[in-house]
Image: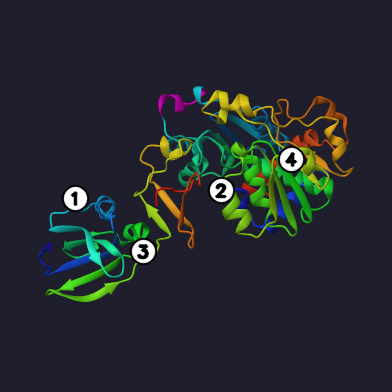
């Protein structure tokens, strides 16, 4: 059994689909944080079989929950204070995702215009479809 | 201040008002011929277009206004690497309204976000072409007398054909509209139109490959050109370009009231022999394009 030290103050991203933790690590910019970050891959889970977990030491506002909601809104966010879970945050699909995804349409203005924000808008909540604000191309890697 | 980036920027009521104004301009051109005196329209055309640019210029001149602009990216500061955002800020100092055509999709939206004058999308890549849609709507309304209760066949390049995308977007807001989408598999309608527009609004549609079989039930046949400039692969273009050619013989399959529209320019998808058929209204459509652009300029400049 692998042991990872428990958090005193921080938050735990639980129920991450197995294999998605590094995607979250990248999109949340966790590599830029100075605090302790633990990534647990393929942890055993009664509910999911296998899951990934990320433990982050520090206040919740150091990460963008909209980005997390975009990647997987089924992830549970457990807030830890004095070593115990004090709150659970529910994630929702954000209506807009800014500067996280890059439009892959070679005909899109974002491919040439300098310093233009990459903006994707939720166009179908049920099917979780996001489209580029400018060219309406569907984001396909979700 | 308002812009026109998509046909959806206007509500059905606003569209009706605009089309009504265009019809009045058609009947009483003298009433409007001085309304834009002292106003300037900038035509910012980053890719070649004879018809749309001249239509805008003709519209502004018919209103007594003036025009300035460029007709290809090579003649503009874009060739020096200037961004759309910078260009529009500068043009805002020179003109009262502008029409922009750009090969990149969403460019007019970027321009509108930085502009202090109304921006009209005159076509952005394979995305939207709202003033062509206004032209199409005015043509249908004027010649059919209605915009509801219509079965519309769209034929040719439905993938990159922005006029088709914009027309579908606009027509789904009217009652009892249905579509027959006629194209080769490779040029079928993009999923964002199929899913977000047709299916989301419960619009009846069918996707077919055979033009003749579809023709008899149509009120409108909207032909399009397979556009060479939208293909990255020349072989693919050559393989698809002659797939649909409307001939005099094929017109025998159509009913006597079916109208043929085409956004033009035509290459060979409608034989010249069809031009004399009273159902061929694509040259009348060009004239309606001027009236509707006149109405649009007046509306966006808040002169009516």
Across and down, in percent, residue A112 comes to 41, 34
* Residue where numbered disc 4 is placed: B222
Q: CA distance from mark 4 to mark 2?
A: 20 Å
Across and down, in percent, residue B120 comes to 59, 42
Q: Secondary structure at mark 3?
A: loop
Q: CA distance from mark 3 to mark 4?
A: 43 Å
Report the chain holding disc 1.
A
Q: CA distance from mark 1 to mark 3?
A: 22 Å
Same chain? Circles 1 and 3? yes
Q: Which mark is residue A31?
A: 1
Q: As rendered, which of B259 and B96 lies closer to the eye? A: B259
Same chain? Circles 1 and 4? no
Q: Which mark is residue B191?
A: 2
Q: Which mark is residue A73?
A: 3
Q: CA distance from mark 1 to mark 4?
A: 54 Å
Report the chain holding disc 4.
B
Is residue B232 something one can see in this rendering?
Answer: yes
């Amino acid at each position: 059994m692998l042991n990872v030290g428990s958090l005193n103050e921080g938050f735990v991203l639980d129920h991450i689909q197995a294999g998605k933790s590094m995607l979250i690590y990248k999109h949340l910019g966790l590599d830029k944080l100075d605090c302790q970050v633990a990534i647990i891959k393929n942890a055993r889970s009664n509910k999911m079989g296998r899951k990934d977990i990320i433990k982050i030491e520090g206040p919740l506002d150091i990460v963008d929950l909209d980005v997390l909601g975009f990647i997987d809104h089924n992830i549970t966010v457990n807030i830890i204070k004095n070593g115990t879970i004090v709150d659970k945050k529910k994630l929702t699909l954000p209506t807009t995702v800014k500067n996280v995804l890059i439009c892959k349409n070679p005909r899109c203005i974002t491919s040439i215009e300098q310093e233009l924000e990459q903006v994707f808008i939720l166009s179908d909540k049920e099917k979780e479809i996001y489209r580029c604000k400018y060219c309406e191309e569907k984001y396909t890697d979700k | 201040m308002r812009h026109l980036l998509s046909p959806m920027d206007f509500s059905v009521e606003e569209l009706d008002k605009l089309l009504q104004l265009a019809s009045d301009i058609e009947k009483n051109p003298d009433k409007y011929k001085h309304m834009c005196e002292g106003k300037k329209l900038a035509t910012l055309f980053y890719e070649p277009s004879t018809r749309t640019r001249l239509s805008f210029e003709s519209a502004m001149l018919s209103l007594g206004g003036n025009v300035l602009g460029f007709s290809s990216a090579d003649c503009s500061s874009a060739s020096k690497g200037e961004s759309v955002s910078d260009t529009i800020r500068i043009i805002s100092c020179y003109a009262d309204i502008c029409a922009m055509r750009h090969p990149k999709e969403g460019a007019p939206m970027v321009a509108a976000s930085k502009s202090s004058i109304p921006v009209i999308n005159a076509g952005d890549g394979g995305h939207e072409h709202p003033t062509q849609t206004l032209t199409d709507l005015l043509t249908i309304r004027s010649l059919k007398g209605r915009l509801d209760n219509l079965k519309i066949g769209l034929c040719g390049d439905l993938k990159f054909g922005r006029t088709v995308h914009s027309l579908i977007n606009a027509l789904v807001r009217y009652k009892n509209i249905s579509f027959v989408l006629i194209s080769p598999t490779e040029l079928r309608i993009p999923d964002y139109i199929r899913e977000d527009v047709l299916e989301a609004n419960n619009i009846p549609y069918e996707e077919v490959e055979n033009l003749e079989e579809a023709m008899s039930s149509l009120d409108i046949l909207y032909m399009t050109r397979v556009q060479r400039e939208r293909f990255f692969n020349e072989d693919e273009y050559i393989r698809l370009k002659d797939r649909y050619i409307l001939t005099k013989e094929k017109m025998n399959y159509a009913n006597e009231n079916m109208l043929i529209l085409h956004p033009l320019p035509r290459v060979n998808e409608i034989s010249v022999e069809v031009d004399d058929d009273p159902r061929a209204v694509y040259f009348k459509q060009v004239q309606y394009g001027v009236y509707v652009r006149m109405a649009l300029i007046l509306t966006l400049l808040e002169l009516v």
